Amino acid sequence: MIDTVRVNIKGGDGGNGCVSFLREKYRPKGGPNGGDGGNGGNAYMLGDSSLNTLLHLKFNSTFYVERGGHGKGKDMHGGNGADEYIRVPLGTVVWLMDENGEKQLLTDITDTTPRLVARGGKGGWGNTHFVSSTNQEPVLAQQGERGEYVVLFLELKLLADVGLLARPNAGKSTLISHCSAAKPRIAAYPFTTVEPVLGVVTSRGRDFVMMEVPGLIEGAHDGVGLGDQFLRHAERARLYVHLLDGLSEDPVADFHMVNDELYQFNPALANKPQIVAVNKLDVTEVREYRELLEEAVRRAIKDSPVIPSTMETPVFFISAATGEGLDQLLAKIVEMLEVLPKGQTSLLPEGELVASGDTRDRGPISFRKERGVFVVESEQLERLSARADTRDYRVLLQLWREMSRLGIARKLQDAGIEPGDTIRIGRAEMEWF
């Protein structure tokens, strides 16, 4: 089962603005009419209940969102780029990775609401935006803004109402196959189940999703037997059915071990309500010692250091093979689910949707002197100069006006810039005058 994947996403670039002037019969100097560029498409993560794995993203993990169209003459705006919707299973946790590989929680997808993960760039302005009473012939237009580039780490934590927990070979696969239409592999050796299995169970006119978590052994929270990968899926369940093997050498020790692994992995898991089901009632030894087993299990629940003393923890004896006792168990599951909070557990505060961190430069305009060259750092000016012909004196004059309007010209003069000095804006270099 593919439940983790790294994804690279590039938001659509904005379209470039256009430099154009109206030229018609009887109107040879009709004025500027360059249209704006279109906005680049955004990238969204979208929960899809029909998916239960990230396999479809394993070998198709890079996405380039459509860019915006360029502006044209006659005030024709470029079209906006189409948004990209990346479908993922419900229960997918999205992490934003920085340059150092550190992860930051971005969003938790527990419903079908689209989550923005990469913004598209804004379209550049055409030259009509730069006309004024003192600038009747604007020859500047903005380059489209770059789309946001993000590296995401997706981690799937399956959504289920009931999590089925136990040591290996306790009968979990037999139980879920008896209760639902799920068909897990069943065999008389440990670790038969190597990935979570989901099944829809119907009881008392109610449907709920049961998930079999592969068998847990001591040290599972540290990754022994891939336990950390299995426990990750158990985080979403609202209720646990803790299955004990009635033929185990020490069912009480098994009970404490599994609960301790839950607590070590995430203390919140041990606080979730549980139902204890002792399996293999069809075996004579289990049936004969039922009272002693039940007394020992109830004492273990009372003495457990991780299970809250105020929590109700019912105990049932069942046979997953013959179905004995399953009706009573399922009835209790339905009863407890009715009073538990509905909806799936999210890692984010209720109602909070975290948008992607915008890594583009939006800081104040600044400059520095580098080997005698004044390097101006301003995304707005870089977008203007990127498509400008700096050999044209009109372009230089209008760039100087923009720098004056933004206040950078005064800062350069205070720093001692003189006519003839070189300034660099993005990749464009020009002389100060």
Image: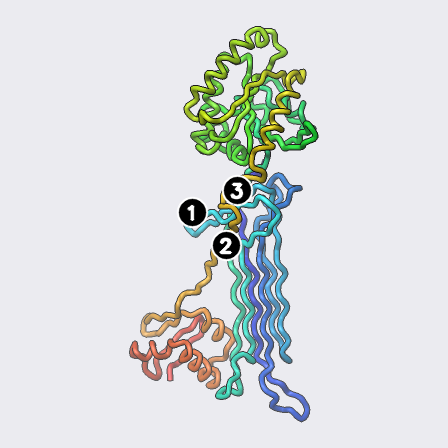
Secondary structure found at label 3:
loop
Where is mark 3, residue-wise? 346
Asked which secondary structure carries label 2, the reply is loop
What whole-number distance in Å separates the C-alpha atoms at marks 1 and 3? Answer: 21 Å
**Is residue 84 or residue 259 the one in the foreground?**
259
Figure colour scheme: rainbow
Residue 324 marker: none
Residue drawn at x 48%, y 13% as measured from the top left: 296
Q: Where is residue 258 in the image (x, y as percent from the top left)?
A: 48, 24
Q: Choose mark 2 or mark 1, whichever is in front.
A: 2
Task: Locate residue 73: give its quadrant.
Answer: bottom right
The answer to whether residue 307 shows anywhere in this view is no
Quadrant of the rendered structure where residue 161 is?
A: top right
Judged left or right of residue 85, residue 399 is: left
1 or 3: mark nearer the eye = 3
SS assignment at label 1: loop
Residue for badge 1 = 102
Quarter of the image that includes the N terminus? top right
Q: Are marks 1 and 3 in contact (CB under 8 Å)?
A: no
Q: Disc number at residue 356?
A: 2
